[in-house]
Image (cartoon, grey):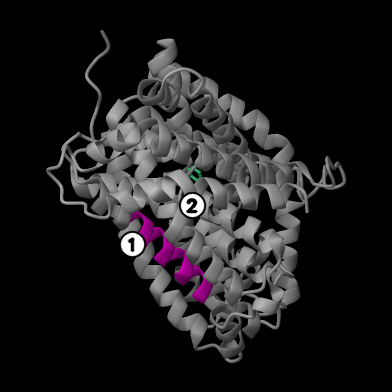
């Protein structure tokens, strides 16, 4: 018999850890530039729609599978649904590696930017010079690799510490701090000269810019940001004691994640306009290129820069930890390896995969598969394909295989009043499979 499963220390601890998984580079690095590239306000509305309709129901579904089974994703699907379904969990484990391969690279950039904020590289108001700082860093060879390796090692360090000690404690202190610094930066960005046009672009939808690709981008971003579709939420749910109120916790996590993404948009997009950049121009470098100008316009800007990149690195860490934890939890549960060993081997695999991603802006910038660099391909594979597909299958599993059993488990056998539960089940049975299925198909064949 294995030892009793470790559980979250408190309700707040769980919410902070799950929100820590959700809130990360997806919100602050990816969301603003995706919004810029996909037309601004219209993308925002479609994104919020995806969160409300698919995101919330599926966070609940994943947490429910995890809590019911108290097991890793592969075993959990087997436990609640039987034969064939563990494949969904397995796809999630593979996806975790795919995401980590580029995630640790971007997180590595944030560490480099912590140094840049103190060594003076960023205290230059000239936009071209700031772009050059980013391009120089990312086009390098050893630097991006070393920073990605450092970040991978940090992630492994937290995961070895285990759930309560490592993940929960760190999230509880650092998440609120990130929130405060974000608010300060939003206020500064919005009051920069020229910011109003950015605000308008972000908030006023122009639906003439919407295409099928906008939907693919929005749903992929929603899943990525909520850590959905690959078993991370499921794994965190598996550390939940059975009597907890799932719906309120799920709502808290989804709201926090969405709030932080919108705040990041309010910070980056107006600053982009103030700096004279056209939306979509900055690509994966947007946040890094635009923010130094905001810091520069603040008293004590260097400290804001240092604080911001430090907290962004930490937010990325609480997310990468949940990615690695999903993998490690699987190996520990299913293959009886020690947590230490499972973490070490997985971290080495992540490091190997991160090499081509780290070089995708330099040495390997012209090495393309399906017209994409390795970095872009890993991003595309996860956000546009495996995460939505995992979500679709999770919806089918809970909606059809668990069915009424799911409502029973959700309401803690009727002890929680959840009159809306049939609506939730209806979404999982029909709305999510058809909606996500349509978006996936039109994305693949457009
Ligand atoms: N949600 C995280 C972010 O926004 C990324 C992530 C995706 C984490 C999938 C876990 C699982 O940065």
Q: Identify the residue position indicated by label 2 in the image.
A: 431
Residue 179, by quadrant, is bottom left
Q: Position of residue 362 (x, y in %)?
A: 80, 48
**For residue 206, side relative to residue 170 (left or right):** right
- The residue sitting at the top extreme is 1
330 vs 49, nearest the viewer: 49
Q: Eyeballing the image, is 110 above or below 102?
A: below
Q: Who's the residue at 58% across and 34% down the image?
A: 95
Q: Secondary structure at mark 1?
A: helix
User: In terms of depth relative to the viewer, which is nearer, 428 or 132?
Assistant: 428
Magenta stretch, main secondary structure, is: helix
| Ligand 1 has an atom within 8 Å of the beta carbon of the residue at disc 2 | no
The first of marks 2 and 1 along the sequence is 1
User: Would you say residue 174 is visible in this rendering?
Assistant: no
Chain part drawn in magenta: 253-266
Q: Residue at x 73, y 43 (%)?
A: 377
In the rendered image, residue 75, in percent from the top left (x then y), is placed at 40, 20
Q: Is residue 343 visible?
A: yes
Viewer-nearest residue: 340 or 228? 228
Query: In what element is the residue under mark 2?
Result: helix
Crowd band around label 1 with a 10 angstrom C-alpha radius: few (<14), some (14–19), many (20+):
few
Q: Residue 220, image x and y in percent?
A: 59, 52
Residue 183 highlighted magenta (yes or no): no
Q: Give the mark count.
A: 2
Please identify the residue farthest to the bottom as the structure is shown: 193
Q: Is residue 391 left or right of residue 63?
A: right
- Is residue 379 toward the left or the right of residue 368 in the image? left
Counting from the top left corner in percent of width and height, residue 361 is at 77, 50
Q: Between residues 109 and 253, which one lies in front from this camera angle?
A: 253
Furthest-right residue in view? Answer: 366
Pointer 1: what residue? 177
């Amino acid at each position: 018999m294995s030892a009793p499963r470790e559980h979250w220390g408190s309700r707040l601890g769980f919410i902070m850890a799950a929100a820590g998984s959700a809130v990360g580079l997806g919100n602050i690095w990816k969301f603003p530039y995706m919004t810029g590239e996909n037309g601004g306000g219209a993308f925002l509305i479609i994104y919020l729609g995806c969160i409300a309709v698919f995101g919330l129901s599926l966070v609940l579904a994943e947490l429910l599978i995890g809590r019911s089974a108290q097991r890793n994703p592969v075993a959990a699907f087997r436990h609640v649904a039987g034969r064939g379904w563990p494949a969904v969990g397995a796809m999630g484990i593979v996806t975790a590696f795919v995401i980590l391969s580029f995630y640790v690279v971007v997180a590595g950039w944030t560490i480099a930017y912590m140094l840049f904020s103190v060594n003076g590289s960023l205290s230059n108001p000239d936009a071209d010079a700031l772009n050059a700082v980013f391009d120089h860093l990312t086009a390098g060879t050893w630097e991006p690799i070393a920073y990605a390796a450092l970040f991978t090692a940090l992630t492994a360090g937290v995961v070895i510490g285990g759930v309560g000690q490592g993940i929960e404690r760190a999230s509880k202190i650092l998440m609120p701090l990130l929130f405060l610094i974000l608010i300060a930066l939003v206020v500064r960005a919005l009051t920069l000269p020229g910011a109003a046009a950015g605000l308008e672009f972000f908030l006023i939808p122009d639906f003439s810019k919407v295409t099928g690709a906008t939907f693919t981008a929005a749903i992929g971003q929603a899943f990525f940001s909520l850590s959905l579709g690959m078993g991370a939420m499921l794994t965190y749910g598996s550390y939940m004691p059975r009597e907890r109120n799932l719906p309120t916790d799920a709502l808290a996590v989804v709201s926090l994640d969405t709030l932080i993404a919108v705040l990041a948009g309010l910070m980056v997009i107006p600053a982009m306009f103030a700096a004279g950049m056209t939306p979509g121009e900055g690509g994966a470098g947007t946040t890094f290129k635009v923010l130094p100008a905001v810091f520069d316009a603040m008293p004590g800007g260097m400290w804001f820069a240092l604080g911001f990149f430090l907290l962004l690195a930490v937010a990325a860490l609480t997310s990468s930890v949940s990615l690695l934890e999903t993998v490690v939890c699987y190996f520990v549960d299913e293959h009886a390896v020690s947590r230490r060993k499972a973490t070490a081997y997985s971290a080495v695999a992540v490091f190997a995969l991160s090499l081509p991603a780290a070089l995708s802006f330099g040495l390997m910038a012209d090495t393309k598969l399906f017209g994409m660099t390795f970095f872009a391909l890993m991003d595309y594979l996860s956000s546009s394909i495996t995460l939505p597909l995992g979500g679709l299958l999770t919806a089918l599993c809970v909606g059809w295989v668990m069915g009424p059993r799911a409502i029973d488990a959700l309401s803690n056998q009727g002890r929680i009043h959840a009159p809306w539960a049939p609506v939730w089940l209806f979404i999982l049975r029909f709305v999510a499979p058809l909606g996500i299925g349509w978006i996936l198909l039109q994305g693949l064949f457009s």
